Amino acid sequence: MSVRHLSPGLSRFTRFPSTSLIFAALGFGLSFGAPLSAQIVPLGGDIAVSLPDGDLESGANIAADRNGGWGVTWKSAHLDVFPDIGRQRRFDRDDHPVSGSLRDHDLPSADLGLDGGGKGVTAGVRQRPELGGAEVAAQCFDRLGATASAAVRVDTGAISQVSPYPGAVSIATASDGRSVVAWQEILRVPLALPSVYFRMLGADCAPEGEVISLGSVGTIGRSQPHVAVRGDGTIALVWIEGEQDSNLHVRAQLFDPDGAPLGSSSIAGPSGRLPSEPRVAVSASGLIAVVWKSDLQPPTSGSGTGIGARVLAADGTPTGDVLLLRSSRAANTAAPAV
């Protein structure tokens, strides 16, 4: 296993070695100076992902296929072009760009999933200004990133100026091409609570089954979902929830390939440090790694952010202590990935 990190601005890519899922979780912290083992060092130099064409690029998401190849999708903005567009590019297992795979697509802020052969699926929020709202959409692509299907709507319900607004879309794709898409929704009314939803897609990007809701809790609700999928189709979903700001925490839940819960959810990250931006990944052995952005101090006693991490057993129960991947209080870190 190796760890991949995209540098800010999306111009470069760095690969890190890894001998376990724990070190995979540590990769992001290392690239920002966490005091880890001196044996965890970059493998070679940076790799150019995007082109120096003057566009402002942001919001990168990366995915790997089962053969070691990988792909990136990101948002690209140009001062002379409106609206923003999405872009993606594919690389082989030796980190060489696949010829002809630098392509545009219609979901600027999208996540990316790759199946066992390198076919891809993007999922994100698609604006519907003519209806006054937005929807969660997904689209399939071939191994070169060329469009393989029309974009499909994943969420349900009428879209209007008062309908719930979606965001924080995440997708994970199994080796057989089936995907799971997770997102949050919030009513556009004062003091509305966000809720987390997810739905399965077939290998042809067609939605399967109903939208599954986790509901909302307390005065905070559930938000910021992120999803991963094992080789057997088991879904690992993480999100933020809490009764109050003071007890926000990262929670994790496993589901079978059809979306039925496997056991009960567990607390992956502790309360009291305003966690956000949770991310999850799974290993071939079934272990689960969760990382998130975390305050370095309790909310009432200072500022500064770091990256928290924890490994969960194959059944979703936490193992070991929470790791703080950045110990310096001199600067903030954000956008963790694993």
Image: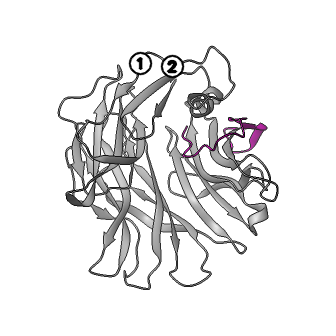
Identify the main secondary structure in magenta. loop
Does the rendering let one see residue 254?
A: no
Residue on which the image places disc 2: 42
Does the rendering let one see residue 65?
A: yes
Image point 58% across, 29% down: which residue? 27
Residue on which the image places disc 1: 45
Q: From the viewer's perspective, tell me whether residue 120 is left or right of residue 17.
A: left
Specify the amino acid type for callout 1. Gly
Q: Spatial distance from mark 2 to mark 1, Cα to Cα?
A: 7 Å
Label 2 element class: loop
Question: Mark 2 touching mark 1, by CB under 8 A?
Answer: yes
Image point 63% across, 39% down: which residue? 288
Looking at this view, name the residue that lies furthest to the left: 100
**319 within the magenta span:** yes
The magenta-colored residue range is: 313-338
Residue 312 screen position, x and y as percent: 69, 40
Label 1 element class: loop
Residue 280 screen position, x and y as percent: 58, 44
Specify the amino acid type for callout 2. Pro
Q: Nearer the viewer, residue 275 or 295?
A: 295
